[in-house]
Image (cartoon, helix red, strand yellow):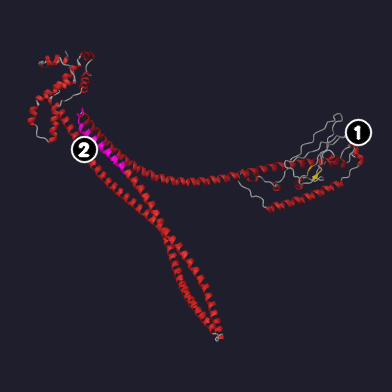
Amino acid sequence: MSIFKKMGRALGFSGEDDEMESQPYTAENITNACVRERESQGEHAESAAPAEPSHNTEVLRSEESGEIQLPDTMLEVMVEMLNRSLPEYVVAALDKDAEKKYLFEQLDEPFKKFVADVNARSREWVVRKWENKHKALTKEVEEARVKVKELEEQRNAMQSAQLSAERQKRAVTDKVHELEARIATLEAEREQFDLENKSLVNKLKVSTVHQEEVDAAYAEVAQLREELKKQTGNSAEAEQLRNDLQQAQVDLAEAREKEQEATVQLEKAREELARQEEKMAQLVKQIETLEADLAEAREKEQEAKAQLETVRKELARQDEMIAQQTKQIEVLEADLTEARNGLKVVDEVEAKLKQFEQVKASKDDRIAQLSKTVQELGEANARLQTRLGEMAQRNERLESRAQEAATRQSELDTLKADLESANALVAALRNQRQELLSQMEALQAAKLLEEKPVPTVDVPPVVEKPEPTVISFDTPQSDEPEVEPVPAVEPVSEQPAESVPESLLETAPQSDTPVQPEQPEAPRQESEPEPEEEPAQPVEKPKPARKSRRKPKAPEKVEVDSVDDDFPGLDSFGDNWLIPTRPDTPEMIAKRKEEEKKRREAEEQAAMEQKKSHQVDPSQMTLW
């Protein structure tokens, strides 16, 4: 016993349905019970219900004759909803079939009527839907039939056109054959006329031969007349001559007749020849016309063949379309039959309709929102397109400016590289100039030491080989003349002045020291002091016990005025390394080369004079 049954009995409900407890509580039995109850109340509903249309009446009758099928899933869901609030032990003790039966019994008449009305409305809606679909399909079938009829008419027209094209083709072919036969006949006539023309020409030639015979006959007649005049006395001969004359006259008449006939025949032959020529020209024109007609007929034949192929393809396509339309009609008829036979009961129509209406409403709202959003997005897109065009123009201007900046940057890099190479060249030249100045100072110091007086000593002289000063250049010039440098000689204490002459000291290192290029003379003359103005410096006397070589002093740095600097470099411009310098013009370079050439010539001349002034004593060479 279920709790609901006990509660019902406790509340005073009678056990009228005890006889049905033995039956299983399935959806079918519950539905049958509901139907029986509905049938008992159907008579009152029929008397009170208004009259409806014929199709609605049929629908209601079908509903009355049928049974309301309430699915088990619906009852199960309702039972689960009710049992959800109960404890688990109570749910375990409950009989679900009894609960389903109780719930079905508790469903009152308005709910059942509502379900029946929903069922009727759903049936009516389905019937209306399938009627509309039936009308649409019927309309499509009629349109398809009309189209098939039109296609049949087009097909018949195409067939008639094909037949007419074939007839035209046959007619053109017959005409072509006829024209070819006519051409052959005209060719034969032309050959016949050629033969006749040749025969007439032969006749003309024969007529010229007869003319010669006639002339000979005339000459013979004249001769005979002369003979007749001479022989008038001889009658027999005269008779014979008369006979001959008559015969000659007859022959002459015949010849004249033949000549006339030949002349007439010649005129006729000429006329016939002219006619034949005219006829030949006409025949040539006719042949050309016939050839043009033949070409046109062949073109028409090709066009007719192409049209025939097109018509055949169109007919095949129309046959395919007809087959497709027929298949479509069959499919539509099958759909119509299936639609007529597919009217079944729709379960849970109310929930689905409500859900559909809710979904439709939500979709309509969503569509409205999306339409508004699409409109806003379209406006934003238009604004963005305008802004994008402006940005594109601005980007083009920026790209042009960037290209100009890149070009200027490349030019600036090139100028910087040129400036760096010029600065490096200037620095190298300045270093070279500094080395030259230091070497010049060393030479000046050596010259001063040579010009100083040498003190006398009692000890034997000990002459040490001086170390030659080697002048090196970073960038030697091969076009400058070679001169002998004067090395710095270390003085020896207590050496007699007459034992080592001054000329020997100046010329002795020539055999051992390498010859170096000559330095520029102009800076040396500016920085070299006069030997007369230089005060005499005391010479240090080394100890006799230590025979060591003392290194010469480092040459003092000679300060050169910045005005005489040929390579100002970058120091003259301060800290600004980016100021470009103007390059030398070809005139300046030529002038500088000319000055250097003159200076070298002067230096060579001075060196030659200096060599001539220094005369070496051969007796003093043994000391070295």
Q: Which mark is residue 460?
A: 1
Cα separation between marks 2 and 1: 153 Å
Q: Please give the count of numbered marks on the rendered protein.
A: 2
Q: Is residue 155 left or right of residue 615?
A: left
Please identify the quarter of the rendering in which residue 216 is found. Answer: bottom right
Specify the farthest residue to the bottom.
233
**SS of the residue under disc 2:** helix
Residue 406 at what x, y percent from top left? 54, 44
Q: Main secondary structure of the magenta part?
A: helix
Q: Is residue 224 left or right of residue 19?
A: right
Residue 13 at what x, y percent from top left? 10, 16
Amino acid identity at mark 2: His
Residue 497 at what x, y percent from top left? 89, 39
Residue 248 at what x, y percent from top left? 51, 78
Does any portion of residue 480 appear in the rendered image? yes
Does any portion of residue 576 appear in the rendered image? no
In front of the other: 529 or 100: 100
In front of the other: 125 or 497: 125
**SS of the residue under disc 1:** loop
Amino acid identity at mark 1: Pro
The residue under the point 92% across, 40% down is 619
Decide which of tag 2 and tag 1 comes sooner along the chain.
Answer: 2
Which residue matches tag 2?
134
The residue under the point 25% across, 37% down is 332
Q: Is residue 194 above or below residue 435?
A: below
Q: Magenta residues?
A: 318-347
Crowding at label 1, few (<14), some or many (≥20) Cα neighbours within 10 Å?
few
Q: Is residue 441 left or right of residue 263?
A: right
Residue 323 located within the stretch drawn in magenta? yes
